[in-house]
Image (cartoon, rainbow, N blue to C red):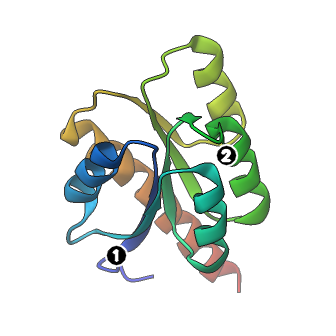
């Protein structure tokens, strides 16, 4: 995979302002925000047809739990990495997120630099995995 190819990002958060802010921070030379959703059900529906390399996922949503949605993503969208972006600082939530496959955990209110640094670390892992996968073919 060429290093200049942009990775796709999908944002799931019930707060429209947070989704907009993340879109402004993330969209650029390295990342293409391909969609967003404000509820767990909307996310499931959109992600059935819209693939993403990375999903930014909130824990608290009006119609579901981000941890349940994380499990759905791991099951239905293998190869998609998840970055939790949430106000939840509960230790068990953080631990469960990481144990269930989230590649990072950012607490709101977030700093744009932290968001990008964390995304860049996840992107490096994705690119390394893809390069290794191509080497085995």
Q: Callout 1 environment at 10 Å: few (<14), some (14 to 19), or many (20+)?
A: some
Work out how far the residue at label 2 is from the one at label 1, CA to CA, in angstroms: 23 Å
Location of mark 1 (residue): 6
Q: Position of residue 67 (x, y in %)?
A: 67, 36
Q: In the rendered structure, find residue 70 and report the number of the disc placed on it.
A: 2
Placement of 64 over or under 130, stated as above or below: above
Q: Callout 2 environment at 10 Å: few (<14), some (14 to 19), or many (20+)?
A: many
What secondary structure is marked by label 1?
A: loop
Quick check: marks 2 and 1 in contact, CB under 8 Å? no
What secondary structure is marked by label 2?
A: helix
Residue lying furthest right in this view?
75
Q: Quadrant of residue 97?
A: top right
Of the two numbered discs 2 and 1 on the same chain, state the one appearing first in sequence. Answer: 1
Q: Position of residue 49 (x, y in %)?
A: 62, 80
Quarter holding the N terminus is: bottom left
Residue 64 or 101: which is nearer the viewer?
64
Placement of 124 over or under 70, stated as above or below: below
């Amino acid at each position: 995979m060429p290093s200049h190819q942009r990775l796709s990002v999908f944002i799931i958060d019930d707060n429209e302002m947070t989704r907009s802010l993340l879109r402004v921070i993330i969209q650029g030379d390295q990342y293409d925000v391909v969609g967003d959703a404000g509820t767990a059900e909307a996310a499931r529906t959109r992600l059935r047809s819209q693939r993403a390399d990375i999903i930014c996922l909130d824990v608290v949503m009006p119609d579901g739990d981000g941890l349940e949605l994380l499990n759905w993503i791991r099951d239905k969208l293998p190869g998609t990495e998840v970055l939790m972006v949430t106000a939840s600082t509960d230790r068990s939530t953080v631990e469960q997120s990481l144990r269930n496959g989230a590649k990072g955990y950012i607490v709101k209110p977030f700093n744009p630099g932290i968001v990008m640094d964390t995304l860049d670390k996840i992107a490096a892992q994705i690119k390394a995995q893809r390069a290794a996968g191509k080497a085995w073919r």
